[in-house]
Image (spheres, rainbow, N blue to C red):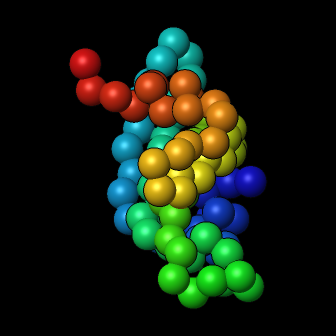
């Protein structure tokens, strides 16, 4: 998926940031406190992260409470050092 395709489903991100590493541009879209599964609960919220590499989705990550899905390592690209 591309930026416009993700935005068509999720809307505008609450936050975004980018980082260039070697010859790739990585962009992180973050969506805060969105409904995890409205079919099951209208009260449970999650944070969603979408990581793009050169304009295409590389990884999708969901944070529910204190737990993150596997592959959290990809978010370390965006940590400030």
Quadrant in the rendering for residue 48: bottom right
- The residue under the point 63% across, 83% down is 41
Taking 12 as reference, is 68 left or right?
Answer: right
Residue 49 seen in the current view: no
Residue 71 picture location, percent across and down: 64, 31
**Image position of 49 with respect to 23: above or below:** below
- The residue under the point 53% across, 57% down is 64
Taking 60 as reference, is 29 left or right?
Answer: left
Quadrant in the rendering for residue 51: top right
Residue 25 picture location, percent across and down: 52, 30
**Image position of 44 with respect to 48: above or below:** below
Residue 8 picture location, percent across and down: 64, 74
Q: Nearer the viewer, residue 5 or 10?
A: 10
Residue 77 picture location, percent across and down: 45, 25
The quadrant of the image that shows the C terminus is top left
Q: Nearer the viewer, residue 53 or 34?
A: 34
Task: Spot the residue most to the left.
Answer: 81
- The residue under the point 36% across, 57% down is 15
**Image position of 21 with respect to 53: above or below:** above
Residue 51 seen in the current view: yes
Task: Spot the residue most to the top.
Answer: 22
The quadrant of the image that shows the N terminus is bottom right
Q: How many marks?
A: 0
């Amino acid at each position: 998926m591309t930026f416009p395709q993700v935005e068509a489903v999720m809307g505008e991100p609450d936050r975004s940031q980018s980082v260039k590493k070697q010859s790739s541009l990585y962009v992180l879209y973050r969506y805060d406190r969105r409904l995890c599964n409205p079919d099951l609960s209208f009260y449970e919220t999650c944070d969603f992260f979408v990581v793009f590499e050169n304009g295409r989705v590389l990884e999708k990550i969901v944070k529910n409470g204190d737990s993150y899905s596997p592959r959290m390592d990809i978010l370390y690209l965006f940590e400030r050092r």
